[in-house]
Image (cartoon, rainbow, N blue to C red):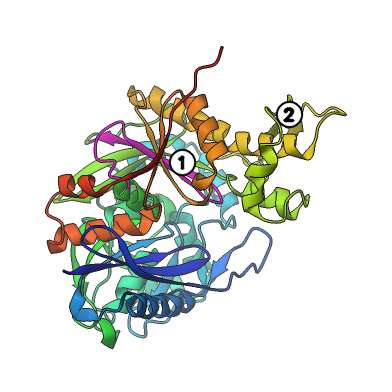
Amino acid sequence: MKHVLALDQGTTSSRAIVFDHRGRIAGSAQFEFAQHFPKPGWVEHEPEDLWATTRRAVLGAMRAAGISRRDIAAIGITNQRETTIVWDRKTGRPVHRAIVWQDRRTASRCAELRAAGHSRTVQRRTGLVLDPYFSGTKVAWLLDHVKGARGRAADGRLAFGTVDTWLLWKLTGGRVHATDATNASRTLLANLRSGDWDGVMLKLLDVPRAILPEIRDSSGAFGEVTAMPGLRGVPVCGIAGDQHAALFGQACFEAGMAKNTYGTGCFMLMHTGEEPVLSRNRLLTTPAWRIGGRTEYALEGSVFIGGAVVQWLRDGLGLVRKSSDIEGLARKVGDNGGVYLVPAFTGLGAPHWDASARGLIAGITRGTSAAHLARAALESIALQVGDLIAAMEDDSGIPLAELRVDGGASVNALLMQFQADLLGSPVVRPRIVETTALGAAYLAGLSAGVWHSRGEIASLWRRDRVFKPRTTG
């Protein structure tokens, strides 16, 4: 029975998980790496740290599973998406640290482009909004601020990639410079409908085509590993950005199916079918994945502060010792006591996109307790997700049948029940909540023949618990 190895390269750690043919975890390993903050609003990673921790995780996961490369049918890669790396094609050395998706250094450039009236063009061509979140302005910044980089890029001596492309380059010993449709869609440089690099956007952001990777399907042959003896010859057969992989791992294969990941922030994707839906509510339009040359699309909304509001109650206010204690504290009261919390600590994400917004607590009285604040914090997560669902239903015209959930905060039963009550739709938690890595494994295994159809994959998805909406009098 062949296994599939999923590489899940995230913002704070690199993980590797071995899945068997039933989609069950056979072994895993995870290693954190350093975060760099050279200036306020700047966030960087050392690209070699991403590679080194990924290699360590692979070896650890294989040891934990008790397997060798002969037992691995394929490798799937999933990754933090917009993080930007530029390196020398000949030496393989990065010209600068990676600029992380959280980095805001190009905010003024995005503001200039908005002021010049380019917002509508950007949405129509890419499905995105003009924001430093995405890779395009990060690439331009690197070319303009690293000595000699722009000339070397124009001559084809430099390569650009998001983290998936960097790992693929390293795994294949520099033989393959490619990405998939989902990661390409997060750069501000790819055309939403053609799936190829967009000449208008390249000119607008001043990024030379010679630096760009080839865009391929999310499930298909990318190349064989040469750089790790323990994996030599194993094919890389699937790549997708983390949220797209999670949508696939949740088996959201039909229009109207949606998943939400409750992590530090919240990331919601709704499958909308084979035609892109441009949002009237400032959501993102994105490829869900591309398989067999056919692109399926999704609407996406991001909440900046989700589970992080619980971390703030723990670290900032000292209301709980552990994040897991928040549910017990919130259950000490029957409701929020009229207290509402808006966790706009770093502004508001979709559908508001208000970078200047700041946090707010309203409704405090002498009777307000720590339990009321805890309950209001949990409810703030669900209320923000509710905003996204309302916007998605309005944009797509598709009512939500159920919400599939994953991520660390999805284990909080009080939060999940409140979410179901608020949406008026079932909230469904799967048995395997590592859906990002699972999705990457499914995409790779589908190409390698471990699984033969999406129907087979959907049959492996199992509910852990369903939170049904309660009617109120």
Separation (CA) of disc 1 from disc 2: 33 Å
In the visual, does 20 lie left or right of 408?
left
Q: Residue at x 20, y 76 (%)?
A: 71
Structural crowding at the residue carrying mark 2, measured as other residues with C-alpha within 10 Å and reported as few (<14), some (14–19) or many (≥20)? some
The reply to whether residue 357 is in sight is no
**Left or right: 296 as drawn, with respect to 467:** left
Of tags 1 and 2, which is closer to the observer?
2
What is the secondary structure assignment of the residue under circle 2?
loop
Residue at x-position 65% and y-position 69%: 38
Q: Is 50 left or right of 292, judged from the image as shown?
A: right
Binning the other alpha carbons within 10 Å of mark 1 as few (below 14), some (14 to 19) or many (20 upward) gives many
- Please tell me which residue lies in front, 366 or 46: 366
How far across and down, in percent of the image, does residue 320 sit?
Answer: 73, 51
Q: Amino acid at mark 2?
A: Val
- 293 vs 97, left or right, is left
Residue 76 screen position, x and y as percent:
28, 64
Q: Please, which residue is most extreme toward the bottom here?
A: 229
What residue do we see at 45% from left, 62% from top?
Answer: 139
Front residue of 154/334: it is 334
Quadrant position of the N terminus in the picture: bottom left
State whether residue 396 is above or below residue 174.
above
Label 1 SS: loop
Can you tell which quarter of the image residue 339 is in? Answer: top right
Q: Which residues are magenta?
A: 250-273
Can you identify the residue that label 1 sits on? 129
Is 8 inside the magenta-drawn segment? no
The residue wearing badge 2 is 339
* Residue 4 coordinates in the image, percent (x, y): 24, 67
Percent x, y of residue 359: 71, 39
State whether residue 46 is above or below residue 163. Answer: below
